[in-house]
Image (tube, helix red, strand yellow):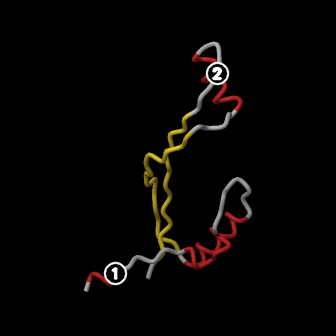
Amino acid sequence: MPLFEVNTVSLFRHKYVIEAKSLEHAYDTVYCDKPEELTQKHLEETILDGREITHKDFDKLCLDSMNDSSELSNAHLGNRIIHKVDYSYDS
């Protein structure tokens, strides 16, 4: 069965409580100082794109993601990370 790489973007709402002289200073604090958030809520996930890939492409994706320190990766799981659609209900 073919493999597909699907890329998404997730949108989160973060809530902070900032003590400051003005709202503008509170905004600046969030952007510049990265304070601790009070809450976080996942709002949506949007599909950006997708493409069919080979198992060789998958192996390269895993290797590249493990070597990219800017990404969190589950590539160490190898083929176990591939989600298989359950078509058993189609019968």
**Residue located farthest toward the top when viewing the structure as drawn:** 21
The C terminus is located in which quarter?
A: bottom left
Taking the image as shown, residue 2 lies to the left or right of residue 58, namely left
Q: Residue at x 67, y 25 (%)?
A: 29
Amino acid on which disc 1 is placed: Tyr
Residue at mark 2: 19
Q: In this rendering, which labeled residue sits more in front, label 2 or label 1?
A: 2
Nearest the viewer among 63 and 12 is 12
Q: Is residue 40 left or right of residue 69?
A: left
User: Is there a contact, CB below 8 Å, between mark 2 and mark 1?
Assistant: no
**Residue shown at 61%/38% (left/top)?**
37
The residue that mark 1 highlights is 87
Seen in the picture, residue 60 relative to 70 is either above or below; the reply is below
Q: Amino acid at mark 2?
A: Glu
Callout 2 crowding tier (Cα within 10 Å): few <14, some 14–19, many ≥20: few
The N terminus sits in image quarter: bottom left
* Disc 1 secondary structure class: loop
How far across and how far down the image is residue 84, in percent?
45, 77
Name the one closer to the observer, 13 or 55. Answer: 13
**How dense is the environment of label 1, judged by Cα within 10 Å: few (below 14), some, or many (20 and up)?**
few
Percent position (x, y) of residue 10?
A: 50, 49
Q: Of helix, strand and loop, which one carries label 2?
A: loop
Dot placed on the residue nearer the N-terminal end, 2 or 1: 2
Tell me the quarter of the picture where residue 87 sits. Answer: bottom left
Estimate the spatial distance between the alpha carbons at disc 2 and disc 1, rounded to whole Å: 54 Å
Camera-nearest residue between 4 and 29: 29
Count of numbered badges drawn on the protein:
2
Q: Residue at x 38, y 79 (%)?
A: 86
Instruction: Note whether 33 is above or below 73 in the view shown.
Output: above
Name the side, left or right, on which 88 lies relative to 71. Answer: left
